[in-house]
């Protein structure tokens, strides 16, 4: 499962990770604590990525610049338009784990420079 691979890779690179199984669990996790980066699959069960982002935008708007969206539907105009609209970082599946590390680093730099 991609979630587990991402978690293991990030933890192996000294990141502290909270992994959830769906968007609703993600909202609960974000309400409990702050995150330096939020890796968000656009096609999550119970609450897709765009709706998850919108929920976070309403409750913790300062976290919106910390999102990294992942998708296997790169050619989907709805997903592309959404990511462009929110100016989000995006990784298209399949991606290299090194690209994920770079994206997390860039999000951390961007969020701490504001």
Image: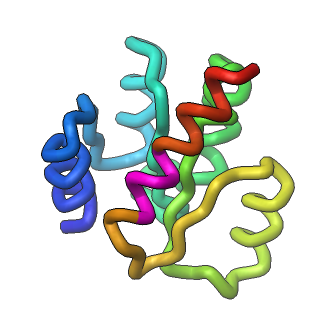
In the depicted structure, whether residue 7 falls above or below residue 45: above
Residue 30 on image: x %, y %: 45, 23
Q: In this view, does 65 lie to the left or right of 22?
A: right
Front residue of this view, candidates 90 and 40: 90
Residue 42 on image: x %, y %: 54, 61
**Is residue 102 located in the magenta-colored stretch of the structure?**
yes
Front residue of this view, candidates 93 and 110: 110
Is residue 74 visible in the rendered image? The answer is: yes
Is residue 61 visible in the rendered image? The answer is: no
In the depicted structure, whether residue 98 falls above or below residue 68: below
Q: What stretch is highlighted in magenta?
A: 99-104
Residue 18 on image: x %, y %: 27, 33
Residue at 39 percent across and 12 percent down: it is 32
Q: Quadrant of the N terminus?
A: bottom left
The quadrant in which residue 2 appears is: bottom left
Q: In this view, does 94 lie to the left or right of 1?
A: right
Q: Is the magenta stretch mostly helix, strand or loop?
A: helix
Residue at 62 percent across and 21 percent down: it is 112
Q: In this view, does 78 lie to the left or right of 69?
A: right
Q: Quadrant of the C terminus?
A: top right
């Amino acid at each position: 499962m991609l979630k587990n691979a991402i978690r293991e890779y990030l933890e192996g690179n000294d990141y502290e990770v909270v992994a959830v199984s769906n968007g609703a669990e993600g909202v609960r996790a974000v309400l409990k604590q702050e995150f330096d980066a939020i890796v968000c699959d656009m096609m999550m069960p119970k609450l897709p990525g765009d709706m998850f982002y919108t929920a976070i935008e309403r409750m913790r708007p300062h976290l919106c610049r910390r999102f990294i969206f992942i998708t296997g539907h790169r050619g989907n105009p709805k997903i592309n338009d959404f990511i462009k609209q929110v100016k989000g970082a995006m990784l298209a599946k399949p991606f290299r784990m090194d690209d994920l590390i770079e994206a997390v680093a860039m999000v951390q730099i961007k969020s701490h420079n504001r």
